[in-house]
Image (spheres, rainbow, N blue to C red):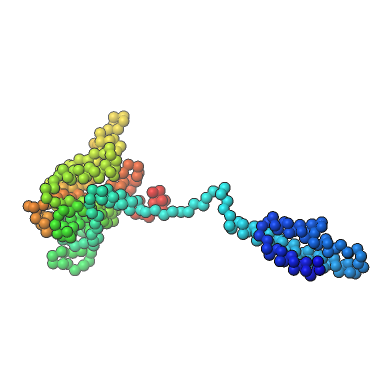
Amino acid sequence: MAKNNVLQTFKTEISKIASLDDLLLLETKYFGRNGVLNAQLKNMKDLNAEKRKALGKEMNQLKYKILESISKKRQEIVSFGQKNTIDVTLPGKKYASGSLHLVTYAIEEISNIFEKIGFIRMSYPEIEWEWFSFEALNMPKDHPARDDFETFYIQSPTNQKYGKMILTPHTSSGQPREMMRLGKPPIRMINIAKTYRPNWDASHVPMFHQFEGLCIDKRINITHLKGTIDFFAKEYFGQDRATRLRPFHFQFTEPSFEVDITCDICAGTGKVADGTKCRLCKQGWLELGGTGMVHPTVMKAGGLDPNEFTGWAFGFGVERVMMMKPGVGLNNMRALYDGDIRVLEQF
Ligand code: DAH
């Protein structure tokens, strides 16, 4: 082969090579004992000193060019391989995955439980008129909950009928709103929403969530209320839990109760294994929230005839029930809203 052609041919050949094995074969083809380059030197001994020197120099340059492009090709093949092969023996890369907030999970779970027994999920304004939160719920002007220590007031003009604007302090305002929305029973509402009160300690935060159940129809009575609350408690906390209604007072229900659930530590006995008092509940029961039969005045405010319909309502705190769930192990409500990633990523 003429010397000029050696480089040309080599360039064409190497351009077609894609594997290290083929590259090695090509290298041997050029540099092996009987290779292309040695063949070029075969007649060297017949040349005079000057020509020999010139040929030697030329061959060295050729060798250098070929070696250089072989090593460049080798690097290309290796780095292409690194980019395009999967080494199944390497430990996998773990991507950080986000998750929903603990309270969002609790809201989903609560909605699903009530959906199973035909309750419709609703949410009503977070900025609400006093009337829906208080008057319509039979809470007179001088009721302590209306104090500005208990409720956030918005600087707004006062409406003649509806009063001032407030940040809704409880989901009970959803009761008259739902009665008005539907116009007539049957009503089975579960209103889950943000609620606001100016408190800040281990079991209170100024923005929290409540879920409000409302059931109104002809001949609805306390047994339906007890059955529904029991169903919720067993679904959410576990089939071994029981509930009780304890007489209490609320303006918007008559009769009114607080709902208690058996403590999961002492199983409702108030005593732990060694016979001592349960430190969590002291007497076997934990408080869930408030409930009762809808007051006739509230029915009327919602546009319904209390002689024709009866109903019940309850209001529980989402954060509260979630923190009472066995295994959650959270004893400070503020930790939910501090936004500390070390807390949130545990759930
Ligand atoms: N709204 C009450 C609160 O925030 C809870 C409540 C009590 C709701 C009794 C009700 C009820 O529907 O019947 O403390």
Residue depicted at 16% across the width and 64% down the height:
163
Residue depicted at 58% across the width and 57% down the height:
84
Query: Residue 6, image x and y in percent?
Result: 78, 66
Residue depicted at 18% across the width and 55% down the height:
175
Comparing 53 with 322, the one in front is 53
Quadrant containing the N terminus in the rendered view: bottom right
Residue lying at the far top of the rendered structure: 274
Query: Residue 183, image x and y in percent?
Result: 14, 59
Q: Is residue 15 visible?
A: yes
Query: Residue 31, image x and y in percent?
Result: 78, 59
> Height in image: 1 above or below 115?
below
Residue depicted at 17% across the width and 67% down the height:
158
Q: Quadrant of residue 178?
A: bottom left
**Would residue 10 appear left or right of 295 to someone viewing this image?**
right
Residue lying at the far front of the rendered structure: 1
Comparing 30 with 78, the one in front is 30
Question: How many numbered discs, if any?
Answer: 0
Q: Is residue 202 visible?
A: no
Query: Residue 258, image x and y in percent?
Result: 19, 45
Comparing 189 with 132, the one in front is 189
**Would residue 39 appear left or right of 157 to someone viewing this image?**
right
**Would residue 179 appear left or right of 193 to someone viewing this image?**
left
Comparing 198 with 99, the one in front is 99
Q: Quadrant of residue 287?
A: top left
**Would residue 166 appear left or right of 18 to someone viewing this image?**
left
